[in-house]
Image (tube, rainbow, N blue to C red):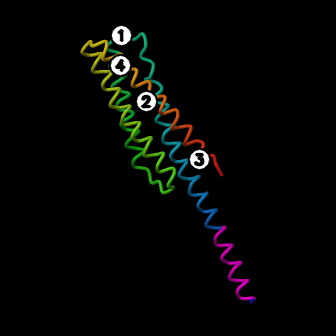
Amino acid sequence: MRQRLGFAALLIAVALALTGCGKIKKTKECNAFIDKVNTALKEIEQHTNTAGQDDAKAVAEMKKLAELYDQLAKDVGSQEITTKELKTHATEYQAMASKAAATARQVAQAIETQNSDQAENAQKEFDKIVKQEDELVNKINTFCQAP
């Protein structure tokens, strides 16, 4: 009987330790992911206001945004994430970043070819993607801050 109690106590201790390790892993992975995204977004934000710019400047800014979002998608995809829910969020975020890059290129091309309707539609799509990014960031923050 005494051995069973000792073994049961050991199992409980191991279970608690593993739970703690899982939380530590989640926190570590969340922090690495958030740091990577925040670093990229600081640079992205420097290139997002193209309103009122001449066409050449707007094209250059949108092409730069495309490069930055492509790099962000690569960086997010290359991160070692083993926490299942964070992995799902990271995959969604990577897809969003790739879509933002492609749409930024569409905006740039439409401006270059002076197709104002296409430029306007592509810009609306880009703005919609940015809103999606905000929603994804909120979901990730909620997950990462949960106990």
- Position above or below: 112 against 91: above
Q: Amino acid at mark 1?
A: Asp
From the top left corner, tell me how far across and down residue 76 is, in percent. 43, 44
**Which mark's residue is nearer the viewer, 3 or 4?**
4
Q: Residues within 10 Å of mark 1 (few under 14, many from 20)?
A: few
- Residue 11 within the magenta-colored segment of the rendering: yes
Label at residue 129: 2
Left or right: residue 90 versus residue 142 is left
Quadrant occupied by the N terminus: bottom right
The residue to which callout 3 is attached is 144
Which residue is at 48% across, 45% downward? 89
Tell me which secondary structure the magenta stretch mostly adopts. helix
Give the answer, above or below, for where 105 lies relative to 141.
above
Q: Residue furthest left?
A: 113
Q: Earlier in the sequence, mark 4 or mark 2?
A: 4
Instruction: Tell me the number on the disc at residue 45.
Output: none
Q: Disc 1 versus disc 4: distance between alpha carbons?
A: 18 Å
For badge 2, the amino acid type reads Ile
Secondary structure of residue under mark 3: helix
Q: What segment is highlighted magenta in the picture?
A: 2-16
- Residue depicted at 68% across the width and 72% down the height: 13
The one nearer the camera, 136 or 68, is: 136
- Residue at position x 53%, y 52% in the image: 29
